[in-house]
Amino acid sequence: MSIPVIVAIDGPSGTGKSSTSRAVAARLGLSYLDTGAQYRAITWWMLSNGVDVNDPLAIADQAGKPAIVAGTDPAAPAITVDGVDASGPIRTQEVTAAVSAVSAVPEVRTRMVEIQRAAAASAPAGIVVEGRDIGTTVLPDATVKIFLTASPEVRAARRSGELKGAQSVADTQAALIRRDAADSGRTTSPLAKADDAVEVDTSELSLEQVVEQVVALVGEKRAAR
Ligand SMILES: Nc1ncnc2c1ncn2[C@@H]1O[C@H](COP(=O)(O)OP(=O)(O)O)[C@@H](O)[C@H]1O
Ligand SMILES: Nc1ccn([C@@H]2O[C@H](COP(=O)(O)OP(=O)(O)O)[C@@H](O)[C@H]2O)c(=O)n1
């Protein structure tokens, strides 16, 4: 058996983290973990249970309650909260608007990071983990660290394509920029590029080109060890 490979993919919203991570994991036969889905899931639970998402103490007090389970199959990402499928509700605009406040609470992060490290440690061939703080905090010894970027215009156009006109491109861009600022500005493990991460600007690249670059980097690291 070869040593498991750990790939950390970080970056702001709409840079291609999920699409790239799933494709790389599928191509290399690795597990896959979407940590953003976990933060969205705990946010959905807080909203559903009447917790004031602008009250960090109230969030901290409840952070240990929901059981969040994320699947690790890149062909079928799954997320449940207390056994209930949360894959639809976690993508609503209500959750998107509240997730940065909930994920800034240290007690929430401590809990999520524990689940994330356990998933990485138990992946048989290795794992691709995507998020905001994977290379800096969750898995600082990852084999390969990637930091994806793209211009705000490109990111907003990609996101509004997915929202199918539910929100204007201008509103989507403004919301992305607000979330970037909150995620980069928080005290506990903010969105940041690790010093040893490779930055890839995806603005002018196709998904296939980004996937090729990441697969090539993993191949180089594997050959070197
Ligand atoms: N390199 C790319 N070129 C064009 N579209 C892309 C690229 N990467 C991702 N996309 C598309 O952009 C949208 C957002 O991608 P996603 O992977 O969800 O980003 P993130 O996880 O960083 O928010 C998706 O609709 C996806 O198909
Ligand atoms: N490792 C991570 C991943 C996500 N998050 C939080 O979760 C939110 C949603 O992440 P996401 O990856 O689903 O966001 P999108 O890029 O899909 O819009 C982010 O805006 C962060 O507030 C985090 O704090 N740390």
Image: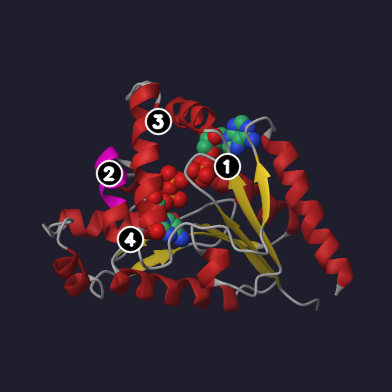
Name the element at disc 4. helix
Kind of residue at badge 2: Ala
Q: Quadrant of the C terminus?
A: bottom right
Q: Give residue 189's position: percent from left, percent from top.
A: 43, 66
Q: Main secondary structure of the magenta part?
A: helix
For residue 50, which quarter of the picture?
Answer: bottom left
Q: Nearer the viewer, residue 145 or 122?
A: 145
Q: Tell me the CA gap for discs 4 and 3.
A: 21 Å
Question: In the drawing, does residue 140 fall left or right of residue 60?
Answer: right
Mark drawn on residue 103: 4
**Label 1 close to label 3 by CB (< 8 Å):** no
Q: Is residue 183 above or below residue 222?
A: above
**SS assignment at label 3:** helix
Query: Crowding near pointer 2: few (<14 within 10 Å), some, many (20+)?
Result: some
Which residue has dot 3 on it?
173
Up the image or down, 18 lies above or below 81; here it is above
Residue interval drawn in magenta: 93-99
Give the mark nearer the N terminus: 4 vs 3.
4
Residue 84 in view (yes/no): no
Which numbered tag is attached to residue 97?
2
The residue drawn where x is 72% and y is 37% is: 208
Of the numbered discs 4 and 2, the one sitting upstream in the chain is 2
Q: CA distance from mark 1 to mark 4?
A: 20 Å
In the rendered structure, which disc, 2 or 3, sits on the residue that comes first in sequence? 2
The residue depicted at 51 percent of the width and 71 percent of the height is: 137
Q: Is residue 102 above or below residue 94?
A: below
Kindly report which numbered mark, 2 or 3, lies closer to the viewer in this rendering: 3
State the residue position of label 1: 16
* Circle 3: residue type: Gln
Separation (CA) of disc 2 from disc 1 = 20 Å
